[in-house]
Image (cartoon, grey):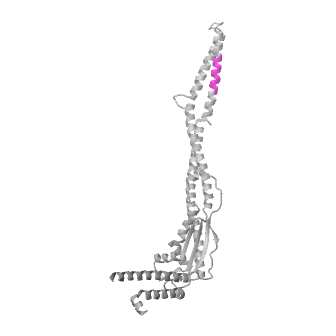
Amino acid sequence: MKLFFRQQPYWPLCMLLIVIVSGYWSLWATDRYVSESNIVLESPQISVPDLNFSSLLGGGGGGGGDMLLLRDYLLSVDMLRKIDKELGLREHYSNHSVDFFSRLRSVDIPIEDLHEYYLNHVSVEFDEYAQVLRIKVEAFSPKVSLDILSMLLREGEAHMNAMGQRLAAEQVRFLELQVAELNDNFHSARKDLINYQNLNGLISPIGSVESISAVVAQLEAKLATLQAEKTMMASYQSETSPAVIRIESEISALHQQIKKERARMAQQSGNALNTLSAEYQTLELKVLFAQESYSGALAALQTTRIEAARKLKQVSILQSPTLPEYAVQPRRLYNIIVFMVISLFVTLIMHMLVLIIRDHRD
């Protein structure tokens, strides 16, 4: 046996390592308590009118996107700093009552090293199928693991609400500025229209044009009747007869009146009703556009304010943070068996290599 150990020194070394590691896991390794919780994010169910204007400000992801954002925040350095400041994370994990290999090596280690240690003791996994976040926190005390997990839930919900409210507030501020600007444009356009009506003494040039067109049509109809009478009278009366002269006078007066009415509607010198009507239509369209824009902005502002309420996120707890009653970590027997199997396997490989080398030498 002594000769065997002399020729194969790695076997005693393997046995020694197995004894040491087994002693560490079974006697020295400090218990770690795990607090668990399962959560989902929910938003208030508020119906919002479907407005095209608000789609310009559209955005936002689905529930899965929010859950991933929450997961990243819970594992972030910012979250670590808050927990360390409130719960004294450094002091707990670097406590000298914890075994050397499990504890944090120093209270004053850089934040990068502390964050790496934090990620090894805090697990936040997103279950895509169930759309659930499964959170686990390991600590050397049941109460500390529960406190850390409770703070993660509280701060995570506050962060998601702050992020959503900040975006909603920016949208509301933008729309409020747009509403104020469009309100000024609407009142300015309406004032220009009223001033134009007062200046020209017309409520609606378009209505006046329609009225004059009707008058001209009536005059032309009367003119056609008189011309027919004149033609008939010319067949049996002379041109100097009083009746013919009267009809000619009426026809001449109608021609002048028709010419005058048509001049009111259109003439090259300006101030004709067609010019006034065109300018009036332009001003009326400006008022209509300003009114519709203002109305759309008001509706979009109201919609955005309602949407802001939907951006509130509530952490719905499917499983409340547990207060561990016994340590589930480390898995002592499992770790010993795994190390033993790996050690024996590696030693066996070394033994086979040595035998092969010796056979080649011989």
- The answer to whether residue 354 is left or right of residue 266 is left
Residue 190, relative to residue 359: is it above or below? above
Location of residue 68 by image quarter: bottom right
Q: Residue furthest left?
A: 361
Can you say which quadrant of the picture contains the C terminus? bottom left
Instruction: Say if 18 sits above or below 66 in the image.
Output: below
Residue at figure coordinates x 39%, y 90% from the top left: 6
Dominant SS type (magenta): helix
Residue 69 or residue 313, whichever sits in front: 69
Quadrant of the snapshot with the N terminus? bottom left
Residue 264 colored magenta? no
Name the residue furthest bottom.
2
Region of the chain picked out in magenta, as a range: 214-225
Whole-percent x, y for residue 265 in the image: 58, 29
Q: Quadrant of residue 230?
A: top right
Quadrant of the rendered image containing residue 148: bottom right
Count of labels in the image? 0
Regarding residue 187, the answer to whether it shows in the image is no
Give above or below for 120 relative to 29. Answer: above
Name the foreground residue: 79 vs 70.
70
Residue 74: x %, y % from top left: 54, 71
Residue 298 drawn at (x, y percent): 61, 52
Is 220 covered by the magenta stretch? yes
Q: Nearer the viewer, residue 356 or 151?
A: 356
Which residue is nearer to you in this view: 213 or 325?
325
| Residue 321, position as x, y percentages in the image | 62, 75
Q: Would residue 307 be visible to someone looking at this image?
A: yes
